[in-house]
Amino acid sequence: MADSAVHNTEAGDDPSRRDFIHIAAIAAAGGAVAAIAWPLISQMNPSADTLALASVEYDLTKIEPGQQVTINWRGKPLFIRYRTQAQIDEAVRDDSAQLKDPESDAQRHKPGKAQWLILVGSCTHLGCVPTVGGGEYGGWFCPCHGSVYDTSGRIRKGPAPKNLVVPEYAFLSDTKVKIG
Amino acid sequence: MSGHSTYEPKNGFSRWLDQRLPVTRLVWDSFVDYPTPRNLNYWWTFGGILSLMLGVQIVSGIVLAMHYTPSASGAFASVEHIMRDVNYGWLIRYTHANGASMFFMAVYIHMLRGLYYGSFKPPREVLWLLGCVIYGLMMATAFMGYVLPWGQMSFHGAVVITNIIGAIPVIGGPILTWLQGGFAVDNATLNRFFSLHYLLPFMIAGVVVLHVWALHVVGQNNPTGIDPKSKVDTLPFTPYATVKDGFAMSVFLILFAVFVFYMPNSLGHADNYIEANPLVTPQHIVPEWYFLPFYAILRAVPDKVMGVVAMFGSIGVLFALPWLDTSKVRSMRYRPMAKLYFIILLVVCVTLGFCGAKLPDDQVIPGLETFKVMDSDLNSFVWLSRLATLYYFAYFLIITPLLGLIETPKPTPETIASPALSHPPTTPAGAAADAEKKG
């Protein structure tokens, strides 16, 4: 103890010792700022009740062929479309067309359930809700920026980069589907 | 410009205060004795008008917040409650809603004035940058304010604009979720927008203080673009600028009142009187008029990420302007070629605004059949926006740097006073005496 005190007076202010104190103080302050900033940033992320996502069950007998219902799923619209044979044929025929986000129609519905197309109803461009039956491919037309989807929900024209998203879902029976 | 202070306390109290907090001296030096170029025209009154509008928006906004409910279930009803039940609620809300439009109208005139008279050129680069920051904050504030009534346009506008963030590769998705506070625009989004909408105007006020400070360090530009050389070139702020600003404010307030009292919904959209419904997007979604040119740029680019880049770039390019302009002459009054391209820019900006309000595939000339280029008909608003967008960027990135190098400007006057005074003074001394007699 005495030794170091003597050493200190002799050397005046030891630069390495000063530097260490500066670095330690700045590091501590920096750590404290980060520790305070994190909760302030994180609070803006989805809260626990938003994360506790519910799944939705839907009775398909309510839908007529050619019709689409829109239900609310996780705050977003969900399209359940009962496709006619003509619409399915059109979608299958276009499997070989030039696609922006190539996917075959079979990849977009459950096997043997080609009539049921279940999609997240928000445009992959900027999230508007596309209008059913609009656009030159008979699928959907987004009124916001003019994206056109075909009867398989694939992007065919306009600024959207991706096909309409197929959510995770399962058939509980022939007439009941569970989404999420 | 900040020379020696001429403030002299008149009584015991002001002397006492001046030695402790020289706030009266600051006001005197900044807004009374402050020398302004003698040739300022009415385009220079918009700074004062903007300060007034910021005040109007803050006061009316604070009052509205006393009656508004920031929740997805209550917001729409509370706005209707303000309109129907709150005493003078309709007046306060119409003032606030139309005030935003008036604010933007004034800021666009203010910016174009700076563009035309070269107010962004040295030594006013920081002044210009601060102005660009204020404009950015204004746009954020206006966007979040438009979401608060929770109508159809509010909601789907919020969906579209927040999804722009989602266009950023890789990190866009998590940032979007963080920003929305969920997986879609919902109550959490509305609440934070309300909080930030209340905060940002005070941040604007803070940057305005810096803006005015920077202005008073370098001094005002003027229609000739040349620096004041002697006392004869300037006039004291009070009464000359104060009275001129006051008159311009009065005229501006008349226009404002016409909107508030006679056509309060003309600048809004009818769909925003329908409560937000996440399952149905309005047939034709458009932003407020002051965002239409940027919206047109966004839609002009066929690629999602590049569209967003172009939209932000159209604002970002303003920040770079002081370093893009190579001309030594500030005012376009003496730059015939620059003036021409500036007028084309004005037309292009209005065209972009017009395109932003139209459906992208609608025909510009009805009935004229053309052919398709890049997936869109040539005779469509998409293509008109594309051409206009090209010119917009070319003006800043190509025309402005090149013009300074190739054009021959007209001769600029020796001093501000020589074109401003009808009889140019032969000797500076006599002129100074003249000016003093007038004052």
Image (cartoon, helix red, strand yellow):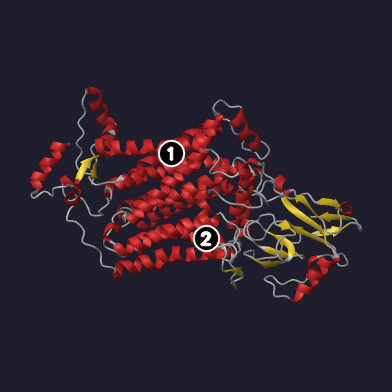
Residue occupying the far right of the picture:
A174
Residue occupying the far top of the picture:
B12
Relative to residue B144, is residue B332 drawn left or right?
A: left
Mark 2, residue position = B297
Residue occupying the far front of the picture:
B367
**Closer-to-camera residue (A140/A15):** A140
**Amino acid residing under circle 2:** Ile
Subunit under mark 1:
B
| Marks 1 and 2, the one that precedes in the sequence | 1
Subunit under mark 2:
B
For residue B359, which quarter of the picture? bottom right
Relative to residue B286, is residue B39 drawn left or right?
A: left
Residue B304 horizontal/vertical position (percent): 59, 64
**Any part of residue B64 in sight:** yes
Mark 1, residue position = B255
**Amino acid residing under circle 1:** Leu
What residue is drawn where x is 82% and y is 56%? Answer: A67
